[in-house]
Amino acid sequence: MNQNEISISKLLNEFFSDYRYVLKLILYSLLFSIALYFILPKKYAAEMSITQSSSSSLSSGLGNVSSIASSFGINLNNMEGDIFYLPNLINSNSLKYSIVSKDRVIKNNPNTLIDYYNQSFITFINKSEEKRVYNAIESFSKDLIVLEDQNSGMITVKYISDDQTLSKEILFDIKDYLNEYLNSDLNLQASSMLQLINSEIKSTKEDLNSAEEKIAIFVDKNRNYFESPSLIVQYNRLERDVTILTEKYMNLIVQQTMSMIEEKKQLPQLNIISTPMSNPSPYSPKILNIFLIVILLVFSFSLASKGYKVSTKP
């Protein structure tokens, strides 16, 4: 081994043997970390917890509807559960665009998140609105955290920004968007089938009333129709029409009930477990993380410096 070389273990022993020097490094590192903590920009997080109601509770409360449907050979208890996945909606670009494009007051200035996320010089000189929106959505996605507990199904939504009020406001906007989407957009989509069924029910009911009226007029005009074979044939034909239309009408009523139940099953109910709340303590930076990084850098530099001095000592 070269006489100028020194082992790592020996270097560490010499370094930590001077405990006053080590304590001095720790103290300076702590003071520097505290100073950095107050200098660095702060990020604040707001969060809310939501759940999506299960459709299993619906089938247990069907009551008389289940028994009516079962008489037609339909088992409502075997219908599948919810097909809607709430985290997908929260992470959708449609929601994000709605949030970033909304006019709001940010730090006492009328603004949108599109402008908020495009304050740097590079994005400022790029005047393409499409790229500004894309950059805002990408930046918003990094600040939005969606976590799902697989056991309880509870979804925690967090938003992080340098404005404590803004973080909380964004979560309220997300909650309002979810409620509006679930109560209007999905209901509109789900009601299209019901509209078709209701239209068919109305048409069938009119045909049934007409058929019943025809048979009533026939009986009124031919009170002794059962004495004539030809009149009996006509009566049976009219009666068959009424029977067919009655069965069709009843089947449509069952389909209408099924569609209404299925619609309610497929539309999730949003349950707010905890309303949006912002934490007054900064989400980042963490003073402990700063201190650990600073002390690691200081110790590494001090060890390297001491090792260089020892290795070059004659």
Image: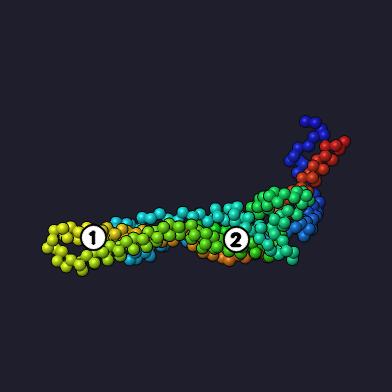
Quarter of the image for residue 73 reads: bottom left
Q: Residue at x 58, y 64 (%)?
A: 176
Q: Quadrant of the N terminus?
A: top right
Residue 49: quarter of image: bottom right
Query: Which is closer to the viewer, label 2 or label 1?
Result: 1
Q: Residues within 10 Å of mark 1 (few under 14, many from 20)?
A: some
What residue did someone put label 2 on? 174
Given residues 171 and 173, the one toward you in this image is 173
Residue on which disc 1 sits? 238
Q: Is residue 41 left or right of residue 150?
A: right
Q: CA distance from mark 2 to mark 1?
A: 60 Å
Q: Secondary structure at mark 2?
A: helix
Report the amino acid beneath label 2.
Ile
Whether tag 2 and tag 1 are in contact, CB under 8 A, the answer is no
- Frontmost residue, 25 versus 205: 205
Q: What residue appears at the point 77 percent right and 41 percent down from the top-left corner? A: 11
Three-letter amino acid code at disc 1? Leu
Q: Where does the C terminus fall, quadrant-wise?
A: top right
Q: Nearer the viewer, residue 13 or 58?
A: 58
Residue at x-position 37% and y-position 59%: 200
